[in-house]
Image (cartoon, grey):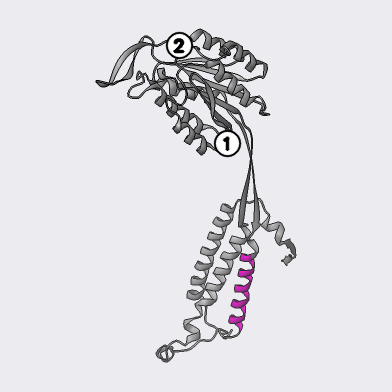
Amino acid sequence: MNLEFAGLKLNILDVINTTVSPLVIFVAGAVLILWMLYYHRKYRRFKSATIKYSDLKIVRRAGRSARQRYRFLLTAFRILAVSLFIVAFARPRSGTEYTEVTSEGIDIMLALDVSSSMQAEDFKPHNRLYVAKEEIKKFVERRINDRIGLVVFARYSFTQCPLTTDYGVLLNFIDQVDFGLVEDGTAIGMALINGVNRLRESDSKSRIMILLTDGDNNAGEIDPVTAAALAEAMDIKIYTIGAGKPGNAMYPVQDPLFGKRYVYQPTNIDEETLKKIAEKTGGKYFRARSGEELEQIYTEIDAMEKTEVKIASHIQYTELFHYFTYGGLLLVIIETLLAHTYFRKLP
């Protein structure tokens, strides 16, 4: 749409698409409206009468007609029209934002020892298994778009939860982990083989295992170092965690005569083997002597194995300026028609 004013042709779209800040437009518009109000009051007060009378007392006693009382509407329409034009020139828009999230997730298998030694209560006020489960759940809740699974082991190893992105289901399976699921013992090598088997068909660029145990390998057909070599061949990184305070720890024992009582037993963690597993696969070995240290360990692993997330967002705008422009033009037309018809006055 083109307009010609004082010999100057203006394109409305070019004006509206100006790069002038909307704040500047609103400030200039406010100044313009204030000037219109000031000019209107001054014009009415000081304008010289076209027709002069010697005495206006009779006219004042006659009262004001409806046309006189509501003549202020002309000024109101004009100011409102200018306000709408100002808003239109500020180029109002409504937008809908679209966000696309693409990520390269990590496949993670968690291996958790559920042997009887995990009942040791050196992670006060709970036992090792309870604290380990709570820290694993915190670790899971911090992950984004990763597939995570859970392997539990004692004398035997089995998959408690396969790789999944449904963290609600996984957390429920973690809560169900308890003692007595399998015969007592510690088959670290079989736990690693089970985890590797779950990860071997994964097409993820990064595949890791996090093994937590408080003992040494005393069961299973495959030793931990051999299992680690298989994980290395499949480019699977293993982080190992030894849980338990050095020295003796209190273990609960159910006595048929005296009920529950505690006995002291030594903590036997094969740290050398756990270190070899981690070094062989490019991982790292950690020792957790308390619940606080275990929390820090899972936080550190979480920081080292970050998922790459790319977020691309764009906004689709809908232009709204024409609504305000049409409204302002309508008010100008109404004001012009009323000024030359109903509110018309003598020159």
Which quadrant of the figure contains the N terminus? bottom right
The tag on residue 27 is none
Q: Which residue sits at x=51%, y=80%?
A: 71
Q: Is residue 101 above or below residue 49?
A: above
Residue hosting label 2: 269
**Callout 2: helix, strand or loop?**
loop
Q: Position of residue 119 (x, y in %)?
A: 38, 21
- In this view, the residue in front, 190 or 275, is 190
Residue 111 located left or right of residue 245? right
Residue 263 located left or right of residue 236? left
Q: Which residue sits at x=38%, y=13%?
A: 245
Residue 252 magenta-drawn? no
Q: Three-letter amino acid code at disc 2? A: Ile
Graded by Cα atoms within 10 Å as few (under 14), some (14 to 19) or many (20 or more), the crowding at tag 2 reads many
Q: Position of residue 162 (x, y in %)?
A: 57, 31
N-terminal-most mark, 2 or 1: 1
- In this view, the residue in front, 11 or 41, is 11
Q: Is residue 102 above or below residue 96?
A: above
Graded by Cα atoms within 10 Å as few (under 14), some (14 to 19) or many (20 or more), the crowding at tag 1 reads some
Q: Position of residue 6 (x, y in %)?
A: 72, 66
Callouts 2 and 1 close, C-beta under 8 Å:
no
Residue 271 located left or right of residue 94? left
**Callout 1: helix, strand or loop?**
loop
Q: Is residue 8 above or below residue 114?
A: below
Which quadrant of the figure contains the C terminus? bottom right
The span shown in magenta is 323-340
Q: Residue furthest left?
A: 258
Q: Disc 2 and disc 1: Cα gap in Å?
A: 32 Å
Residue hosting label 1: 165
Q: Three-letter amino acid code at disc 1? A: Thr
Closer mark to the observer between disc 2 and disc 1: 2
